[in-house]
Amino acid sequence: MDTFTLDGSVPAALFSGPGRTEIGGNHTDHQHGHALCGSVDLDMLGCAAPSGRNVIRIQSEGYPLLEVNLDSLLPREEEKNTTTALIRGMAAKVQELGYPLAGFDAYVTSNVLSGSGLSSSAAYETLLGNILNYFCCGGALDAVEIAKIGQYAENIYFGKPCGLLDQMGSSVGGAVAIDFADPANPVVEQVDYDFACSGHTLCIVDTGSNHGDLTDDYADITREMGAVAAYFQKKVLREVPEGEIYKNFLALRKECGDRAVLRAMHFYEDDRRAVLETQALKVGDFDRFLFLVNQSGLSSELLLQNVWSPSAPQAQAVSVALNLGRQLLGGAGAIRVHGGGFGGTIQAFVPNDMLDGFKAGMERAVGEGKCHTLRVRPQGGCVVAG
């Protein structure tokens, strides 16, 4: 590519931050459990170059110009739940790690579907992390560290108490198995499996439901699982032996409430499933993998209860799409809620010979162009050219 400069010294570079799909382990990461995820072939692309000014300026296609002055990097209450907060937070963390910041200008375009459960926010954080790494850190940050910086910005500056799954899935690339027993040093393993050879197509279906304003619903899951752990003087469920839940079942129901207990049960079951799904892919047992994905989907609906928001019980588009999808699949493939849940999308692994019928049936119900076929891409966040 032709290069250009804004300050006459360092050429521009092109960066990519992919969307991610959660494959196994629904809401297990924040309880220090296991998860399985993958980057997909939709991404954010950003062309950036140093500006010679102490300001980060980012123009995203279709959105207003964002500016963050690097002289002031403390969290700002008025920026909560904004992209500006993510920029400020990531820059602050890079500075805290001891790297000198430098201003840059960037133009960003994206085909990661906003509110799709493919985590456009993690793609943005991965993109920004790679830009900061390139211009400010000399490439010293690895993919895991970039993911942690994104999570920090989202937790502290944006105000969303998310785990690390979204950022890891985008930053690391390929199918990725993660053990969050020590979140500061998660065990990350790329899984050698070619989904293109499975005879199935990965579909993400936009149900048309609102994926925004759900921070409280997400926070309730973390809070309620944490309340069960706190009953045993622990911070997260990974630290509590599963057997203790059943020994103290009645007391937990009284102390924490039934929904919290059900959500704790989901954690242990889906934590195991994420490990078993990884093992199934390693040995090429895709039928076993599909069975586990279906079981995960049922657990999310019945135990985790993240397929519709209690604040709007009349809106249950995810539940409608899941049950329609099961009818269309007729027992084949697999289907589950995708990502954080409550609104947004569902995920399905559809046999290739059923794909046209599945896509047509889903789009009759949720809208034309709402069923997206994707591939797991081997590359995570990266410098495309520089």
Image (spheres, rainbow, N blue to C red):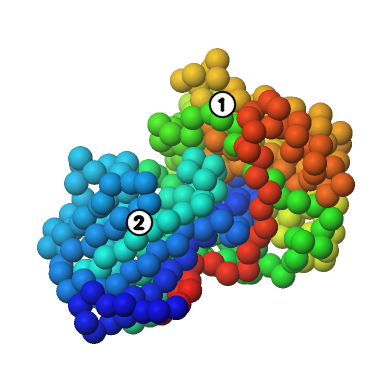
Circle number at residue 308: 1
Toward the bottom, the furthest residue is: 9
Is 307 above or below relative to 312?
A: below
The quadrant of the image that shows the N terminus is bottom left
Q: Position of residue 304 (x, y in %)?
A: 60, 34
Between 324 and 284, the one nearer to me in the picture: 324
Which residue does the numbered mark 2 point to in the structure image? 152
The residue tagged with tag 2: helix, strand or loop?
helix
Q: Position of residue 355 (x, y in %)?
A: 80, 44
Is 349 above or below relative to 127?
A: above
Toward the front, the furthest residue is: 2
Q: Position of residue 50 (x, y in %)?
A: 25, 73
Determine the residue positioned at 40% across, 79% down: 2
User: For the residue marked with disc 1, what is the amino acid?
Assistant: Trp
Q: Could one spot residue 105 in this view of the protein?
A: yes
Circle number at residue 63: none
Determine the residue positioned at 38% across, 51% down: 61
User: Relative to 76, is 201 on the left or the right?
Assistant: right
Quadrant of residue 344 within the rendered picture: top right
Determine the residue positioned at 60% across, 50% down: 22
Between 112 and 61, the one nearer to me in the picture: 61
Quadrant of residue 269 within the rendered picture: top right
Q: CA distance from mark 1 to mark 2?
A: 27 Å
Determine the residue positioned at 43% across, 50% down: 121
Is 16 above or below relative to 325?
A: below
User: For the residue marked with disc 2, what is the amino acid?
Assistant: Tyr
User: Relative to 163, is 21 on the left or the right?
Assistant: right
The residue tagged with tag 1: helix, strand or loop?
loop
Give whichever of discs 1 and 2 has the lower sequence position.
2
